[in-house]
Amino acid sequence: MATQNTIRVSVRRRAATLSFWEQVYLFEVIRGLWITTHHFVLNLYYHILKLFGIRKTHPLTPTIQYPEECRPLALRLRTLHRLARRDDGRPRCVACMMCETVCPALCIQIVAAAVDDPNIEKRPKSFDIDIGKCVFCGFCVEACPEDAIRMDTGILDIASYSRGGMVLDIDRLLSLNAATERTDKEVDQLQKWLLQ
Amino acid sequence: MSPVMYWTTTVAKSVYILVFPLTLAFVLAWAERKQSAVMQDRIGANRASVFGRPWLGFVHMVCDAMKMFTKEDFVPETEHRFLHHIAPGIAMFFALLAFAVIPFGNQLTIAGETIGLQVADLNVGILFVFALTSLGVYGLVLGGWSSNNNYALLGAIRASAQMISYEICIGITVIGAIIAFGTLSLQEIVLAQGTHLLAGWLPRWGILLQPLGFLLFFVAGIAETKRVPFDMPEGESEIIGFNLEYSSMKFGLFLFTDFVETVLIAAVTVTFFFGGWQVPWLYETGFAFPWGSTWAIHPNIAALLQMGAFVGKVVFFCWLMMAIRWTLPRFRYDQVMDLGWKWLLPLSLANVVVTALITLW
Ligand code: SF4
Ligand code: SF4
C-alpha cells in the first residue's frame, strides 16, 4: 500500500509584505540609486586606475575579454575531437567502426583499409567527423577500444561559413593534439586556423 | 548696440545653445552604454577601435552614427509619407527650440557692449518652454499615426496620454516656483537665486524654497523625456512603440530627441531649482565669502565661470537621470497613470496652496 503524503503549501500574499515606506517608493528609489551609484563610483575608480596603468586588472568587473582571454577549461571537458597517434606516428585507430556505430548523431564516416601488420589489421583510409551534427556526447570516446579518438583539444570555438567547412577529415583530426601538451607556437597556429 | 554686433552676438549665442545640447546628447548616447556598463560591473562597448584603441567606446558611437546614416530608410506604405518624413524633425525641432530661453550665463562685456547670455529673454520664458515641450509630442503622435501601424499608433496614443498627465503636474509645480520668485522670466528667476540665506552661508536656490516642487518637477520631467522607467510610448518589450516603422537616421533622430530632452529637463531643473548659472558667493565683480574674505575677478571671467557652472550642473543632472534610467525597472502603464494623476497632481496642487499661503503670510 502506498502511503499518501500531504503537502502543505503556505500561501503568502505579496502585496501585504510591502511596508508603508516601501510603498511610498521614493525611499526605495533612493536606496536603489545608492546601490548603483556605489557600484558606479567604485568601478569608475578602478577603471581610471587601469586607464592610467596604475593597476593591471579591474577587481570588480568579472568580464573575460574573449577571444583574447579565455576562461580556463576543465580537463575533462569534452571539446573538439582528435585522433591520437601511436609512438611510431601511425594513427591509433584500427577502423573498428565502434565510434561510428555508437554515434547518436551519425556524424562519423570511416572508410577502412587493410594494413600488413597482423596486430592492427585495419586502418582508417578516411575518417570524417561532421562537427556541425555532433552533439558532443562523448560516446565515441567511450566506445573506442584503442583510445584513439579523444576529445581533449580544448577547442570550443568551432565555426565555418559553410556546412562543408564543419567536416573535419583525418588529416585535420590527426594534426590536433591535447590542450595540455600544446606549445605556444602551436597555440598560435591554432588561433590562425580558427580565425581563417 | 550696432546691428552688426547685435546679429553676430545673436548668431553666436544661437550656435552655442544649439551645439551645447547636441554635443551633450551625443555624450549621453555614449554614456548610455558606458555609464550603464560601469554601474553594472561591466566594461561596455570596447571593440570598435581607431589606431588600436577604443577611445573609451567613443568609436562605437561614431560607428553607430555612420550605420544610422547609411542604412536603408524604409518608409511603410502609408498615405501620409510627408508626415512620416517630417515627424522626427518636428520632435527634434521643438526640443531644441526650447533652449532659446534658457539662460546659460549672466552677461559678457565685449567692446563696451553688454551681452546677455540668453538667446531670447522672453518675459514669459517658462510658458515658452512648456509650450514647446508640449508641442514636441506632436512629432511622436504624427510619427506613430502616419506609420500606418496599430502598434505605432498605440505608442503615439500612450505618448500623448503620458505627456498630458505629466505636463499638468509640471505646469502646476512651476506655478509654485513662479509664486516663490514672482516672475515668469527665466533670467530673472536665476538672478533671484543669486542671494543667500542664513547670513550668507546658504545660496538661496529654488530647491530650498520649493523642495517638494523640485521633487515633483523632476519626476514629471523624467516622465517627459519618455525614457525608462516612463517609456510607455516606446514600450520596447511590449509594443515597440511610436518609432516602430522608422529606420536609419529618422529613427536615430527620435532616439536623439530623447537625449536632447534629457538635457532640456536637466537645464530647466537647474534653472528653477539649482540656481541656473549661479555659483555660490560669486558676484559680478568676484567672490564674496560669508566669512568676510573677498576675491575680486574680472566680470567677464566671472561670467565664464558661471557658464561653466551651468554646464557642470546640467551634466550632473543628466548623469542623475541616466543613473535613474539604469536603476529603476519600468512602470506598468496603469502605474504611470496612477503616479501622475493620484500622486503628483494632488501633491503639486498642495504645493501651490502651501507656497501661496506662506508667501501671503
Ligand atoms: S561526441 Fe557523440 S555525437 Fe559527437 S562524434 Fe562522438 S559519438 Fe558522435
Ligand atoms: S572506435 Fe576508435 S578505433 Fe574504432 S574506428 Fe572509432 S576511433 Fe577508430
Image: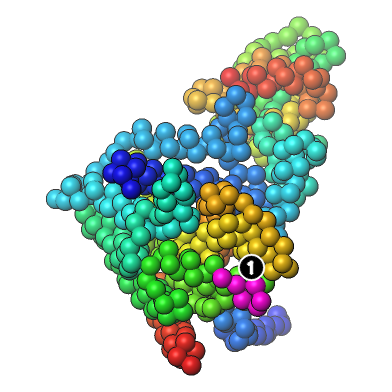
Left or right, B135 with respect to A19, comes to left
Q: In the structure shown, which secondary structural element does the residue marked by tag 1 occupy?
A: helix
Residue that protrudes farthest toward the right in the picture: A87
Residue B163 or residue B334, whichever sits in front: B163
Residue B332 drawn at (x, y percent): 45, 71
Q: Is residue B39 visible?
A: no
Q: Residue A158: percent from the left, percent from the top?
A: 61, 29
Instruction: Give above or below for A48 relative to B130.
Output: above
State the residue position of label 1: A32
Which residue is found at the position 56% from the left and 81% from the top?
Answer: A24
The residue located at (48%, 93%) in the rendering is B361
Counting every numbered tag in the picture gives 1
Q: Residue furthest front?
A: B112
**Residue span colored magenta:** B195-200
Amino acid marked by disc 1: Gly
- Image quarter for residue A108? top right
- How far across and down, in percent of the image, does residue A63 sit? 69, 44
B141 lies above or below A86? below
Question: Is residue B135 left or right of B230 when viewed as pictured?
Answer: left
Q: Position of residue A196 (x, y in %)?
A: 58, 19
Residue B28 in magenta stretch: no
State left or right for residue B174 relative to residue A110.
left
